[in-house]
Image (tube, grey):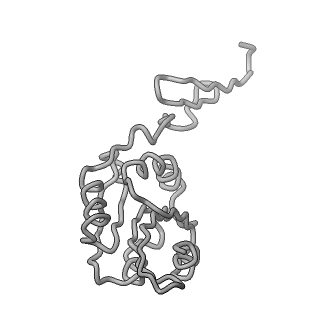
Amino acid sequence: MVDGAVTLSLCFNGLSVIVSWGTELLMPPLMANAASGMAVDDQCKLKFLELKSKRTYRFIIFKIEEKQKQVIVEKVGEPNQSYEDFTASIPADECRYAVYDFDFVTAENCQKSRIFFIAWSPDNAKVRSKMIYASSKDRFKRELDGIQVELQATDPSEMDLDVIKSRAA
């Protein structure tokens, strides 16, 4: 190395990525595949099955517990709760996954239901949180067999009732 020269190195160490500038560590090691390291608590699958087959719940809100490296059930909504109750249960400034069982009547007057998966990633959430939720979403969705409609929302207007109604048809 030439005297006074600065080097940038990217080192791959197992599943971690280490970024340094010379001898100074610029970023803490990052998981190269955060999705594979994020477990799904059995309660998530159990509650989803109860929503899907027994219609025990109207909605389920899921949260990633970073310290435990797993997705957990944060809240469930009773069958009689409204869409407004559901949206009020989602934190305005934190990422969440949610499932909502939406009942509607078609133009032909048929009663139907659609199970929505909503990935809530508000603009004002922490960047790290947005990255973790985005990288874990596909794996988590695979654990929930029976999702019919997926919705990505960064602002409350992107998941208001009119959007849900239009996507259900």
Where in the figure is residue 123, as x and y percent of width and height?
58, 66
In this view, the residue in front, 140 or 10, is 140
Observer-nearest of 89 and 128: 89
Instruction: Give the residue drawn at x 45%, y 63%.
Output: 117
Q: State which quadrant residue 9 falls in.
A: top right
- For image coordinates 52% across by 73% down, the residue present is 168
With respect to residue 104, does 154 lie above or below? above
Q: On screen, 95 above or below 28? A: below
- Would you place residue 152 above or below residue 7 in this image? below
Q: Residue at x 32, y 48 (%)?
A: 40
Q: Name the residue furthest top.
A: 1
Q: Quadrant of residue 54?
A: bottom left
Task: Please give left or right for residue 3 compared with residue 68 in the image.
Answer: right
Where residue 32 sits in the image (x, y, percent)?
51, 34
Q: Position of residue 16 (x, y in %)?
A: 48, 30
| Horizontal relation, residue 157 to residue 33: left or right | right
Q: Quadrant of residue 152?
A: bottom right
Residue nearest the viewer, comparing 16 with 4: 16
Above or below 152: residue 65? above
Q: Is residue 55 left or right of residue 156?
A: left
Furthest residue toward front = 108
Quadrant where the N terminus is found in the figure: top right
Residue 86 in percent (x, y) is at 38, 77
Along the horizontal axis of the image, is 71 left or right of 7?
left
**Quarter of the image containing the C terminus?**
bottom right
Q: Tag count in the figure?
A: 0
